[in-house]
Image: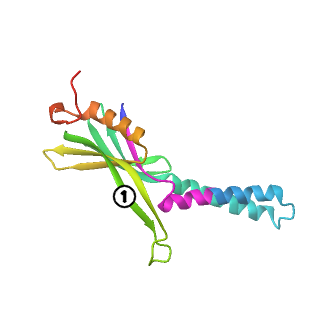
Amino acid sequence: MHLFNYKQRNLGTGIHFLGTILLLASSIVLLSSVFIEEADDLHKTLWVGLSAFTAGLIIINTYEGTLIDLDNKRIKEYFSFCGFKTGKWKKLPSLKTIKLVPIEEKTSNTSNGISPTISTIKFSYQIILSFFPKKLIYTYSYSRKKEAQKKYKLLKENLLVDKFNDPFFKEN
């Protein structure tokens, strides 16, 4: 089974960032018991460290995503909880177009809620799939250009039915 798997998870933002912080905090707590000899209660330290570690792992490994079975032309939007994916497979309609679009957006941090303190330009690359006869549209966003191009090529080669409507298709 040849699968395309898109995970809607970013470890640097949102709830997944909390999971990353919990993992780091748990490692500090667990390592502190090794270096600090005057610890009050080793059991409490281990309990707190292991609890934060477990909560961090659960948060990081809980996310949503999309699986596309490229061989059987099926799609599954799933919810993953610690590796167990729930969702139902649906027949994938015929692909009308596939596009790779670079996105440039300005992001700003408003820490006090009024005035922005830091502004940056963020680049992302989106793969946009549109299907017919239904007007389904799926969008997959990647932060790295090489990864987006690789996934775009994989989807285009396996899903595109009408290659003449694809502006990026070139006959060799």
Q: Which residues are magenta?
A: 4-23
Whether residue 29 is situated above or below residue 133 in the rendered picture: below
Query: Please, what is the three-letter code of the amino acid marked with disc 1?
Result: Glu
**Residue depicted at x 41% and y 38%:** 146
In the picture as drawn, the residue positioned furthest to the left comes out as 133
Q: Which residue is mark 1?
A: 105
- Residue closer to the observer: 124 or 11: 124
Left or right: 104, with 11 as reference point: left
Name the spot of residue 18 as percent of width and height, x first. 55, 62
**Residue depicted at x 27% and y 49%:** 138
Left or right: 63, with 129 as reference point: right
Whether residue 157 is situated above or below residue 5 in the rendered picture: above
Q: Residues within 10 Å of mark 1 (few under 14, many from 20)?
A: few
**Residue depicted at x 75% and y 65%:** 44
**Coloring scheme of the render?**
rainbow
**Residue depicted at x 63% and y 60%:** 52
Whether residue 127 is situated above or below residue 11 in the rendered picture: above
Location of residue 45 by image quarter: bottom right
Whether residue 12 is situated above or below residue 161 in the rendered picture: below
Q: Is residue 52 magenta?
A: no
Q: Is residue 5 magenta?
A: yes
The N terminus appears in which quarter of the rendering? top left
- Can see residue 72? no
- Residue closer to the observer: 167 or 2: 167
In the picture as drawn, the residue positioned furthest to the top comes out as 172
- Can see residue 4? yes
Q: Secondary structure at mark 1?
A: strand
Name the spot of residue 70 as percent of width and height, x first. 30, 34
Left or right: 164, with 54 as reference point: left
